[in-house]
Amino acid sequence: MQITADAHVTLRYAIALEADTAPDCEADGQVTEFICGRGQVLPGLEAKLAGHADGERLNLVLPPAEAFGELDPALDLRVPFSDFPENAREVLKPGMRFRGPHPSEAGKVVAFTVTEIAGDEVVASGNHPLAGKTLRVACEVLAVREATEDELKGGGGCCGGGSCGSGECGNGECGSHEGHEHEHAHEHGSGGGCGSGGCGCH
């Protein structure tokens, strides 16, 4: 069976930056499952897998637009520490995330990751760590089948339902920081599923 919309795909893959050693999915790969057409993996990866069948191996190049997006300087912020609620100030540290409005796109909410506590300011970025990077992906299609009705209803697959590289959106507000949301979450550069926020880069 070929990979088409609503197909359940089991994929072994390894990802590397363009300048790094070529990825080897057999030696370094990890296995993930997703339903095609549901935005559960990188958009460029999903598009380039379409039409391929189980047993096929592919070596792909994904420019930023097909991977984690272009680097957006507007999403690199320095926020006064005092702007955060007192209970958030007690736990803020590099790697933690909070949600706030996009600095230049009204109505859009972005998940920012704290990169540094610099004196009385919090340095944070809403860019994915791999934004602006060209990726090389080595992958092997392990299995393709029709997704079950339950999988289609539930968004199925272990990659999660969010579109990779789109960031996490919520209703938190970071302008006045009243009702501001923060999360005890971290981005990891390895070990993540290709739709989970981590890229599995080696």
Image: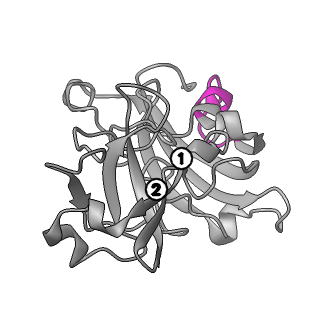
Magenta-drawn segment: 46-56
Image quadrant where one finds the N terminus? top right
| Residue at horizontal 71 percent and vertical 47 percent from the top | 132
Q: Residues within 10 Å of mark 2 (few under 14, many from 20)?
A: many
Instruction: Give the CA separation, mark 1 to mark 2.
Output: 24 Å
Image coordinates of residue 80 in percent, x first then y, are 38, 64
Say the numbered circle drawn on residue 23: none
Residue type at the position of mark 2: Gly
Which residue sits at x=44%, y=31%? 39
Residue tagged 2: 193
Q: How is the image coloured?
A: one colour
Toward the viewer: 108 or 86?
Answer: 86
With respect to residue 79, does 93 lie above or below? below
Per the image, label 1 sits on a secondary structure element best described as: helix
Residue in front for this viewpoint, 55 or 78: 78
Residue at x 57%, y 43% (from the top left corner): 74
Q: Nearer the viewer, residue 90 or 171?
A: 90
Give the percent coordinates (x, y) of residue 168. 36, 44
Overall secondary structure of the magenta stretch? Answer: loop
Q: Is residue 138 above or below residue 69?
A: below
Q: Which mark is residue 75?
A: 1
Above or below: residue 197 compared with residue 44: below
Three-letter residue code for mark 1:
Leu
Figure check: 181 above or below 189: above
* Contact between labelled residues 2 and 1, with CB atoms less than 8 Å apart: no
Q: For this view, does 186 lie left or right of residue 134?
A: left
- In the rendered image, the quadrant that contains the C terminus is bottom right
Residue 105 at what x, y percent from top left? 46, 27
First in sequence: mark 1 or mark 2? 1
Crowding near the residue tagged with mark 1, few <14, some 14–19, many ≥20 C-alpha atoms within 10 Å:
some
Q: Looking at the image, which residue is at 70% across and 40% down?
A: 64
